[in-house]
Amino acid sequence: MASTTADSETPVFHIGTRDKRAGWYTPTLENVTPAQRDLLEKYSHLSSDRVIPHILEVRDRAWEIHPYPCIGELRFIDLSMMNTPSYPQVLQRLKDGASLLDLGCCFAQDLRKLVHDGAPATNLWGAELEQEFINLGYELFLDKETFGGHFMQADVFDMEGPLKQLDGKLDMVQVGLFLHLFSWEGQVTACKRIVGLMKPKTGTLIIGQQIGVLEAKEVTVAGGKRVMFKHNVESFEKMWKEVGEKTGTEWQVRASMDGGLGITEKGRAWDDPTTRRLSFEVERIK
Ligand SMILES: C[S@@+](CC[C@H](N)C(=O)[O-])C[C@H]1O[C@@H](n2cnc3c(N)ncnc32)[C@H](O)[C@@H]1O
């Protein structure tokens, strides 16, 4: 899926290509963070010299199945939840018996980090559209026989699908790099579903991050076939007001934007320069 621009011989790649010259395929990995190394050595029991080769081998298997930017760029080893301001409380609540769903969990690295940090696995859930990503998560973390949490292949928009078993049962939901995949209407529908999955009480918490932008806007991707809405803090707050009105609930949004996800330091040619990472905690207050 590469074409050549009229004025140069530089190939232009489109999302979906398996060509490893695409800008979002990072061929090597120089190092991992101390937390990633700790997880892969102490939780997955990889020897220190196997950590990086193992990540790259699993990534290449994943690339052949779904060559998404998050796979090519090794986003699936990012431990995002631990950087959420509420992480200590999230962990404590889990230890006290609360439940958490990682929606669109992909390899579910944050669920493994929670278990490694002492959360009981029994109340942890991961839901993911693609079963292969769940399988690859087991391969990455080498815990098919030992991980005690629950995974389901599920579509957030399928009201009669496997997610139904969690209706009204969850205390916390993580949505990492997920909501931005959809249009405004799609995000509102997904958020209404999330609200329905949560216990009907104050204090329930939604945490996550997504691709943001300085001026909120709808963008078309995949050659015009798909629409994504990229938020800034104000539009994200506005969306949660709408979700609250439509569900008879009220949510306090704590959100901020920064240059994380490699946006600042990598200076990637395909990123709109106004792209930011939008991180959020959304807590039910009514
Ligand atoms: C960009 S990845 C983010 C993965 C992970 N949450 C993280 O932060 O590293 C988005 C994930 O959402 C999944 N997904 C997309 N549409 C979905 C849907 N309708 N229901 C459930 N999962 C979906 C994709 O398969 C993919 O694994």
Image (spheres, rainbow, N blue to C red):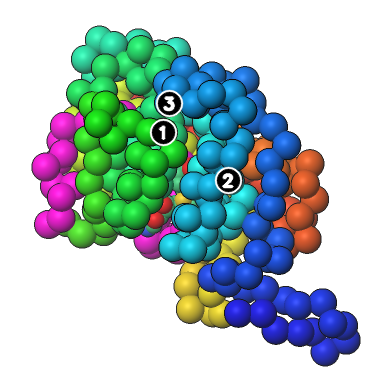
Quadrant placement of the C terminus: top left
* Disc 2 secondary structure class: helix
Residue beneath disc 3: 44
Q: Is residue 150 left or right of residue 236?
A: left
Residue beneath disc 1: 141
Q: Are marks 3 and 1 in contact (CB under 8 Å)?
A: yes
Taking 153 as reference, is 48 above or below it? Answer: above
User: CA–CA distance between discs 3 and 1?
Assistant: 5 Å
Q: In front: 162, or 25?
A: 25
Q: In front: 94, or 258?
A: 94
Residue beneath disc 2: 56
Q: Residue 187, position in %: x, y?
A: 39, 55
Q: Are marks 3 and 2 in contact (CB under 8 Å)?
A: no
Q: Which mark is residue 6?
A: none
Which comes before the other along the chain, label 1 or label 2?
2
Q: Residue at x 37, y 61 (%)?
A: 186
Q: Looking at numbered disc 1 in the image, what kind of residue is underneath it?
A: Phe
Camera sees residue 39? no
Task: Say if the magenta span includes residue 26.
Answer: no
